[in-house]
Image: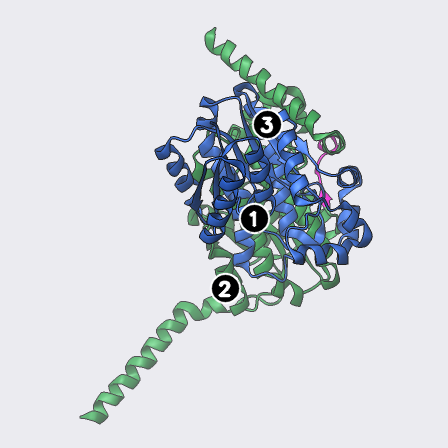
Amino acid sequence: MMRYYLVFLFFLFSYLGSLAQSAFGNDLQIDTSRPYALIAGGSKGIGYGISEALAKRGYNLILIARHADTLQTAKTKLETKYKIHVETLAMDLSFDTTATVIAKWCTARNVRLKILCNVAGLGGANDYLSLALDSLRYMVRLNIESCMALSLTLLPLLEKNAPSYILNVASMAGFAPIPVKNMYSATKSAVVFFSYSLRYQLKDKNISVSCLCPGPVYTKPEIVKDTKEKLGWFGNKMAMDPSAVGEIAIKKTFNKRLIIVPGNLAKISSSLIRFLPRRWVVNLYGSAGNKSKKKKSSSEKS
Amino acid sequence: MAWALIAGGSKGMGLSLAEALARRKFDLLLIARNQSELETVRRQLEKNHCIQVEILRADLSMPESASLIHAWCTTNQFDIKIVCYAAGLGGSKDFQNLPLDQIRNMIRVNLDSAVALTYLFIPLLKKSAPAHILYIGSLAGFAPLSVKAVYAASKSALHSFAYSLRQMMKADQISVSCASPGPLFTKDSIEKETIRQLGWIGKQMAVDPERAGEIIVSRMLKGQMMIIPGKLSFIFSWMLRLLPDGLIARISY
């Protein structure tokens, strides 16, 4: 009786084993012929622009975003167009554990990771005091903490595959405080500072750190409207579309530029913002905000 | 009498602020992690300055602390005129040598809770206007000192936030200030570290914590935005602001 029982167990386990292999085994095999780039927040917006620019250069991609469906559409689009391999991970980058899980996923598969792009970010036209406290916290988690956490947890892999690159996406709002986007510009200023520091901390390891600081990028219709309302003609001239921003960002990341500001007008205004005393810039932004508010209220009245 | 709330008020910079405010006869609400330290400080301040001091134990790296503090203040109906956020974590060589939890903690104490606390207290301050909000930044908030990657990043965010908030709160008669002291020898380890890194200049630049507290409080009450105690620190801060960030990041690692 015991013998039959053992034989049965043997078959059962071997069957389970083969099941497990078919479920996870294929997944563990990863294309090693090409280097990989990991893009946090790569399914939409600037992240997608960056993904496309990297796909054009023959990189395999690992895309991370919250929604599985947008990830899937991005994957099919990129795979059919560029004949590369795209992995997707549907995860919320604001969670404390996410960065560790991603790092484990990559090390288990021994991914040839060459590039890490921290693109995921949250912003809005009005934030402090008009948003709930939880959304402000979410902004800090996503914009600052996930960027630092991913850079730290993926550092061993990047070091192994050196020369490698880290691209953090900040904003022109990171150069000087914008009162209406209070929290957003604070978090982005932290990202700019962090990128500067990281560049020199990782220089010996042959990892180049870059920071993309675009002006307005028309990724969503709300942004188009908001930019035109607040910055008017000038904002519209300065604005760029995400695919152009992605292309410039990747080109300059490979050239090892530290601060990347796409667009000539954005370049000029960003250097002006950085040069002027902060107090002036804040007042300037403040008056622009008030003007648009007044315009709005007068148009509502009429 | 009006109350002043000091987060991180049991030692270091927060304690010097508490003393300076006590001299001006503000009643104090002190918040810190360590209950016994809070109690000794309370006894000391009440004895020396004839003011009322209330204490609350809270860990500002926890997200719920801000609402806890707010609930405590509203149930006791303190008439708060001043909110000082002096809690902060720091250290040097901080990115690669730190575990992830400590990096998160640093951001949560230095930025998250500062933002959350003022968010909850602004309605109260509006009622008791004119009022003051004070953040403690750092010289590292002016330029990316690459030895302190996370610390400098969190402080620069705090600076940026303070500038914006000041503009937002102008109409409500709430004055927002940000103090950015250079090295303060509040702990022996800081003294050693500063002298090792900056040498003679560091020693000259350091301001006595008590004097720094006095300067910061007097200028905050005058409504100054950026407060930098000590002449040498002030000059140094302008150097940090004017020199290109890349240069500073390069030489500071």
Q: Secondary structure at mark 2?
A: helix
Pointers 2 and 1 within a single chain? no
Which amino acid does the dot numbered 3 rest on?
Answer: Arg
- Callout 3: chain: B
- Kind of residue sitting beneath label 1: Lys
* Colour chain A appears in: green
Q: Which residue is mark 1?
A: B11
Which shade of the palette goes to chain B? blue
Specify start and end residues of the magenta stretch as a single range: A259-266
Nearer to me, A117 or B63? B63
| Chain hosting mark 1 | B
Looking at this view, name the residue that lies furthest to the left.
A1
Residue occupying image coordinates x 59% and y 25%: B167
- Frontmost of labels 3 and 2 is 3
Occupied quadrant, residue B211: top right
Mark 3 to mark 1: distance in Å?
27 Å
Q: Is residue A42 visible?
A: no
> Which residue is painted at 29% across and 83% down in the image?
A11
Q: For the residue labelled by badge 1, is the local secondary structure a helix, a strand or a loop? A: loop
Residue A260 on the magenta segment: yes
Residue closer to the observer: B27 or B175: B27
Does label 1 lie on the same chain as label 3? yes
Image position, residue B4 (x, y; %): 50, 33
**Which residue position is annotated with label 3?**
B166
Q: Chain of mark 2?
A: A
Q: Which residue is mark 2?
A: A105
> Where is residue A261 drawn, in percent x and y?
71, 39
Image coords of residue A124 (percent x, y): 52, 32
